[in-house]
Image (cartoon, rainbow, N blue to C red):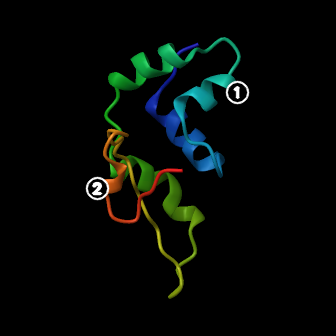
Amino acid sequence: MSFTGLDYCQSLLSSPINYTVTNLADHLEGVSHDQINRDLRGEKLTPRLLWDNVKALLQASQNTYLLFDDPVLDKRYPTSIELARTN
């Protein structure tokens, strides 16, 4: 099975809690975490690609916020990041 950036965007839209590639691979038959990582390295996933896929699903409201957060931070320094904490 070939895996594409669009497949990944669809998984982000359908997963309310766990957005990890490992979780995604656990739910796809015949696709490993490593295969997804290799396939995604060749993709250019832009905010525009995600926006084009979700804008029709959103309803505008004064009380609505849409947040995007894509960095993977080094876990050794979470206490240096405002609003982050470790248990």
Q: Which mark is residue 80?
A: 2
The residue wearing badge 1 is 27
Residue displayed at 51% across by 41% down? 9
List the single residue furthest toward the bottom.
Answer: 62
Label 2 packing within 10 angstroms: few (<14), some (14-19), many (20+): few
The Cα–Cα distance between marks 2 and 1, rounded to whole angstroms, is 34 Å
The x and y percentages for residue 39 are 42, 19
Residue at left offset 62%, top offset 31%? 23
Looking at the rendered structure, the kind of residue marked 1 is His
Mark 1 or mark 2, which is nearer the start of the sequence?
1
Crowdedness near tag 1: few (<14), some (14–19) or many (≥20) residues, C-alpha within 10 Å: few
Which residue type carries mark 2?
A: Ser
From the image, state whether disc 2 or disc 1 is nearer to you: 2
Q: Is residue 41 left or right of residue 32?
A: left
Taking 52 as reference, is 38 above or below it? above
Indicate the position of residue 46 as horizontal and vertical percent values. Answer: 32, 45
Locate residue 81: give its quadrant: bottom left
